Amino acid sequence: MEKSTMVDNRISLRLDDNEIEAIDRFLESHTEFASRSHLAREAMRRFISETEGNSGSQMNETSEKRVIKMVVAPAVMHVLEQMVRGGYFVDPSEAAYFILKNHTINKDNRLDKTIDSICDSRERLVQVDREH
């Protein structure tokens, strides 16, 4: 299993009780963030990206991400959590993102072939009228 490229550096922030309570309230209703640290990392990335006009390549990649909320099977969540406990990723969201980014594009670096393969193996749920 590949390890995440993220280096485990730590910083400290001084926050008062009201700020901590506000963060915790926010996290209760925004389950896409696994922890205070996850929220802080994303907030800092977005702030830097917006402030510096997407100057770094990592900032460009981060600013282009789109949020998808998913419900996964318990077995899938268990695997993602095992990857986190094993030290390969910081949180389950990072593990899922890594898997989707690195294992959905085929050997020729072509996502369209992967999508065609998936669609060919499934029955259509809805008929699409392509004339409009």
Image: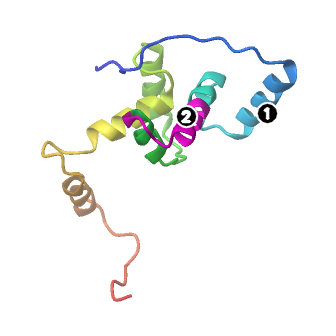
Q: Residues within 10 Å of mark 2 (few under 14, many from 20)?
A: some
Choose top left, top right, bottom left or bottom right for residue 87: top left
Q: Residue at x 75, y 14 (%)?
A: 14
Q: Is residue 17 magenta?
A: no
In this rendering, position of residue 88 left or right of residue 103: right
Towards the viewer: 121 or 5 = 5
The residue at the far bottom in this view is 131
**What residue type is disc 2 on?**
Ile
Towards the viewer: 1 or 124 = 1
Indicate which disc, 2 or 1, sits on the residue closer to the N terminus. Answer: 1
* Mark whose residue sits in front, 2 or 1: 2
Residue 93 in the image: state x and y as whole percent: 49, 33
Residue 15 in the image: state x and y as whole percent: 78, 18
Towards the viewer: 26 or 28 = 26
In this rendering, position of residue 30 left or right of residue 99: right
Label 1 sits on residue: 25
Label 2 sits on residue: 48
| Residue range highlighted in magenta | 42-57
Residue 44 in the image: state x and y as whole percent: 59, 30
**What residue type is disc 1 on?**
Arg
Q: What element carries label 2?
A: helix
Q: Which colour scheme is used?
A: rainbow
The residue at the far right in this view is 18
Q: Is mark 1 on a helix, strand or loop?
A: helix
By secondary structure, the bulk of the magenta-drawn segment is best described as: helix
Choose top left, top right, bottom left or bottom right for residue 113: bottom left
Q: Is residue 53 magenta?
A: yes
